[in-house]
Amino acid sequence: MKKPGIAVAVIAAVALAAFLIYDGFFNKTASLTFFAMDTVISGEIIGADSEKCADEIKSAIVRLDSDILSRHSDKSAVALLNKNRGGKVSPEFRNYLGILIDVSRKSGGKFDFTLGAVSDLWSFTSNPAVPEAEALADAVTSSGYEKISVSGDTVSFESENLIIDFGAAGKGIALDEIRTILDGKNVREATVSVGGSVLIYGGKEKAVGIRNPFSNAGDHIAKITVSDVCISTSGSYERRFEENGKEYHHILDPETGYPVENNLVSVTVVSESGALSDCLSTACFVLGVEDGMKLAKEYGCEAILVTSDKKIYATHGIFTSTEITDSGYTLIEYEN
Ligand code: AMP
Ligand code: MG
């Protein structure tokens, strides 16, 4: 009678040990927190290769910033193009530039990645101040995505003082780079945020909060439940200052050079592509509710637009996955 009891105990012990080894291996969790691209990058990766991925992600994003996107690096593709007024670019850069040009065109120029000189006059990252009207008008005249031409691997500038700036797209591009790293590895799920852009990797659904645009406390007004997507938010609350009783924020109208003034306070775009979610969150913000929703539809992306009168417009595809968490807001399905 004793032997079956021992056998059961042995089997149970072996099963437990196997489970613990399996669990420890496949559910290995790595956390990620570092500063790059002028923002905090943080996340959690679960899977046998999680630690390896965390290391690779860190070096890839530091490289993306210093070698490709940063305007303030002495060797990045963007900085060299600005300095040399054009030049040859890598296929990787050409691909991202293609997305930015496409969004610039489809938004009718309301998204414009050539506003570097205009942004600089506002100094949002150092000592923000309202620029001289004349200097701003000159910078606006020199800017314009249509003054950039691309032929094969060569980019040409057709304006003296134009400065390209990937500020509206860089964090989303980082998510695409991160996804490529995770794709080739043994990773079950991951959540990585790069500033206002988040990658939800793997089939498991996760809730992502929509930030309260009227508070600095980082609290949320709604949440969306999604899997395997990139989510980017552009908000007038992100970089702003007050001068003579008036508020100014960092999302600019390319026609005037001044911050966009419409009834939007934040725009969230959900897409498989990080580059696209980031470009479109900025583009839709500038376009306003009606034209912004049209652009999101044109790209087949879902969007959540928050207005100053506390309405949350959600496209059909994300509406049922959106839940209000602050009763002061009203959720409305946008018929596009
Ligand atoms: P985001 O937070 O992704 O909406 O990006 C905002 C950043 O994009 C700003 O800080 C500027 O560097 C840049 N930017 C501002 N206005 C525009 C615009 N109309 N089109 C493209 N980029 C812009
Ligand atoms: Mg953006």
Image: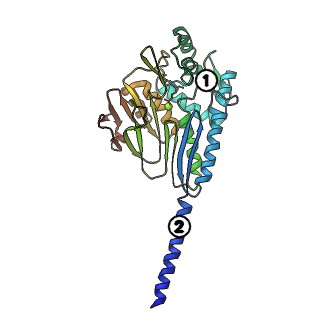
Query: Which residue: 43% across, 32% down?
Result: 216
Nearer-the-camera pick, 305 or 316: 305
Identify whether 121 is placed above or below 61: above
Q: Which residue is mark 2?
A: 20
Q: Quadrant of the C terminus?
A: top left
Secondary structure under the numbered disc 1 in the rendered image: strand
Query: Which residue: 44% across, 48% down?
Result: 227
On the image, the x and y values in percent for residue 90 come to 67, 34
Labelled disc at residue 41: none
On the image, the x and y values in percent for residue 128 come to 53, 19
N-terminal of the pair, mark 2 or mark 1, is 2
Q: Which residue is mark 1?
A: 149
Nearer-the-camera pick, 105 or 309: 309
The type of residue carrying mark 2 is: Leu
The type of residue carrying mark 1 is: Ser
Q: How many marks?
A: 2
Q: Is residue 137 visible?
A: yes
| Crowding near the residue tagged with mark 1, few <14, some 14–19, many ≥20 C-alpha atoms within 10 Å | some
Nearer-the-camera pick, 298 or 177: 177
Query: Which residue: 68% across, 22% down?
Result: 83
Question: What scheme was used to colour the molecule?
Answer: rainbow
Asked whether, in this view, residue 54 is left or right of residue 233, the answer is right
